[in-house]
């Protein structure tokens, strides 16, 4: 296999593979080419890649040379047009949302894998970039909230009196939400968590947070760990509960997302207007519309003295460890595609390979993506 | 007593007294006037002050009306020139450093107190703004470092492998340093601390940090909790130890300060150049020159891929709780100046009143300030 590691575009600071992972690929007989300065924003030099056996190329050469391309972010349409049906693309390109990219891959017959479509099975856990990046996002969201809040997170009892602990409300108790609970608790905040999936209550409690309960939810135990859409009546009760808890919170961290759909609206403008001056909302669902009505993706704004941070790119802001985790996930996945001789081996009998493959020889293999693109 | 609460100047976001403290002063029969929008940056409205019995005035009226002025930051020379010998000034104006302000107060015969000169006695602990603001600074320094670092602070053991914990080196184990140790430990970092005062070792260890020992220090147990200057030989050994530990650290937090003097240089340029790319230095001593040779006050710069943050204004960045603590300290101090009838009562028999008073009737009362100004 001839693997090409691409430099990310735009503001992205991560790199899909750190030199330590490239070293393992070289040992597995993969020929690795790295785009010049691919690791620079993640503090990895070209020399570090060369030292583990990779060669540095510029972009044009790399696109001609490699058969398997790895990057983190979405490719541009222009980039996809330069690929052909002998080449394989691997990145996290959100095909349920970016159907134009799916169509571009189809048009050129490119075999494309999207790391966000890794099946949520036990065997695939070590490849689950959504989980590992959500861990980073949950951690960073709490740090940013604590850094922005005009108050302490922990309680302080000092000679000059007592400072009360901050109250943090976390919406959505998936991987990011649970990580956020854990870190906010470590920093001494009082934490409340809300999730439409009643099944997560125990996990929330075990992390030291209080679970905000709203009765009447649709059972979701068969949804593979994702949230499902709820009834209107339930949503209304849910909304009132969230508004009441948000009004008392110092920080709200929004993490609720539904794959391939707009994020659920959980904090309407009137809820923001009931919050106290100086409060902070971090909206991790910003890229799919946000859980807060006022959120704008990758912008920070202030409404009624409440700061609303629409940050969907936290992993990019912690580039070394986020790259390390992403790369480890990709490496574990790549092992399914590399033969003992180091050659490319597309085995669609493997449920992980099949589930992660979006396009192959001008067909859409992934059923969910297929139904979205064809509808 | 007619008390005037001034609006801070420049970037300062705190306010010396929150409405909850003004309420207590009003109950103690003090007449309180608040400069318009004094609390705005700390999320306190004019109405909130009026609701507890204060009146809002503009600056010109306030300067004429009040006999005791309270603010946090240093006054401008222009402001001091508008005061007279019937008026009392209370703020944290660092007279050991700002001798021009001392001279201006003397010239107009103003009675001035500087809250950073509160004696470090048990009775005065509840008035110690240096300690309470150092608590804020130590806390914020760790949050900012964690937020800037391209790595996690905590260790993670995930399906995709293990992330090692960050190593944080804290220079100076005073109030800020100890607070920084506590928060960095809570966030799961491995923490090392260095202080020339061997006496703090036990406290450092009890917080879960490793004490970096250098032998041959001058005994400082009689220095009232401050560090003393050390010999050249000791400084050289100390320097080597710090350089070695900094080279392995992900984060260095500098907190070493000597009152009225330039901060000790602990991280020379060559130590920065041995640090790893992506490492972060937070220098809390920035306003007095910094512990790091490259620090610039209130600037962030990058040298050899190491980020150096010269932030001496962290309390201003957490304005509600920092104002709450500062105000509680000032309130406890003011109680020594208010008679039962609510009148101003300057009792220089009280060691705290005497020790905190810098100028009175064109004389310098504070001995340390006197020796600095007259030398």
Image (cartoon, coloured by chain):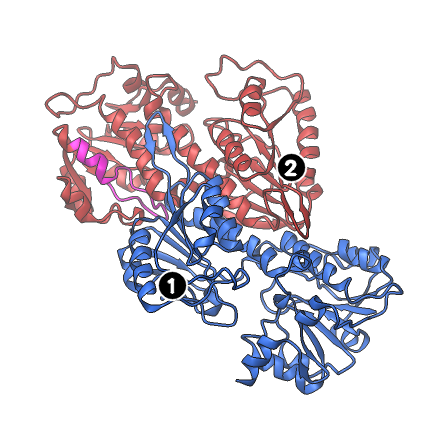
Chain colours: A red, B blue
- Please report, as a chain letter, where disc 2 is located: A
Residue at (55% x, 23% y) in the render: A206
Give the residue pinned by disc 1.
B292
Q: Is residue A17 magenta?
A: yes
Determine the chain carrying the residue at label 1: B
- Examine the rendering and report whether any part of residue B268 can be seen: no
- Magenta stretch: residue A203 in it? no
Above or below A345: residue A307: below
Nearer the camera: disc 1 or disc 2: 1
The residue lying furthest to the left in this view is A341
Q: Name the quarter where the N terminus of chain B is drawn.
A: bottom right
Q: What percent of the width, then of the height, locates residue B6?
A: 71, 68
Q: Are the numbered discs 1 and 2 placed on the same chain, yes or no? A: no
User: In which image quadrant can residue A79 be found?
Assistant: top left
Q: Residue furthest right?
A: B341
Looking at the picture, tell me which residue is in the foreground, A313 or B347. Answer: B347
Left or right, residue B309 beside residue A186? left
Q: Main secondary structure of the magenta part?
A: loop
The span picked out in magenta is A5-25
Residue A227: x and y, percent? 52, 22
Element type where label 2 sits in the image: loop
Q: Residue at x 73, y 81 (%)?
A: B83
Numbered mark located on residue A23 in the image: none
Q: Which residue is mark 2?
A: A268
Could you tell me which residue is drawn at 18 percent across and 31 percent down?
A25
Cα gap from disc 1 to disc 2, whole angstroms? 47 Å
Residue A133 occupies which quadrant of the picture? top left
Structural crowding at the residue carrying mark 1, measured as other residues with C-alpha within 10 Å and reported as few (<14), some (14–19) or many (≥20): many
Which secondary structure, mark 1? loop
Q: Position of residue B175 (x, y in %)?
A: 53, 54
| Residue B359 image position (x, y, % from top left) | 67, 79
A334 vs A19: above or below:
above
């Amino acid at each position: 296999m001839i693997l090409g590691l691409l430099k990310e575009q735009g503001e992205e600071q991560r790199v899909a593979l750190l030199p330590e992972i490239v070293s393992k690929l070289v040992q597995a007989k993969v020929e690795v080419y790295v785009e010049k300065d691919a690791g620079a924003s993640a503090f990895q030099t070209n020399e570090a890649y060369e030292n583990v056996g990779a060669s540095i190329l510029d972009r044009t050469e790399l696109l001609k040379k490699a058969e398997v391309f790895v990057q983190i972010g979405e490719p541009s349409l222009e980039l996809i047009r330069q690929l052909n049906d002998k080449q394989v693309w691997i990145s996290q390109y959100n095909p349920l949302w970016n159907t134009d990219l799916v169509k571009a891959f189809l048009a050129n017959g490119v075999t494309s894998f999207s790391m966000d479509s890794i099946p949520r099975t036990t065997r695939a856990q070590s490849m689950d970039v959504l989980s590992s990046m959500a861990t980073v996002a949950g951690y960073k969201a709490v740090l940013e909230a604590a850094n922005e809040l005009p108050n302490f997170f922990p309680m302080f009892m000092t000679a000059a009196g007592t400072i009360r602990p901050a109250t943090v409300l976390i919406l959505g108790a998936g991987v990011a939400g649970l990580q956020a609970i854990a870190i906010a608790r470590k920093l001494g905040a009082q934490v409340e968590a809300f999730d439409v999936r009643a099944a997560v209550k125990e996990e929330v409690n075990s992390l030291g947070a209080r679970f905000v309960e709203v009765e009447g939810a649709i059972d979701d135990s068969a949804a593979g760990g994702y949230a499902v859409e709820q009834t209107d009546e339930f949503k209304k009760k849910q909304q009132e509960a969230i508004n009441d808890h948000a009004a008392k919170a110092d920080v709200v961290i929004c993490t609720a997302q539904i794959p391939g759909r707009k994020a659920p609206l959980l904090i309407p403008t009137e809820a923001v207007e009931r919050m106290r001056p100086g409060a902070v909302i971090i909206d991790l669902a910003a890229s799919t519309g946000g859980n807060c009505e006022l959120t704008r993706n990758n912008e920070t704004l202030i409404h009624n003295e409440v700061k609303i941070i629409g940050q969907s790119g936290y992993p990019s802001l912690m580039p070394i460890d986020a790259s390390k985790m992403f790369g480890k996930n990709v490496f574990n996945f790549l092992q399914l595609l590399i033969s003992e001789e180091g050659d490319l081996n597309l085995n669609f009998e493997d449920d992980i390979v099949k589930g992660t493959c979006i396009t192959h020889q001008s067909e859409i293999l992934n059923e969910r993506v297929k139904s979205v693109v064809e509808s």
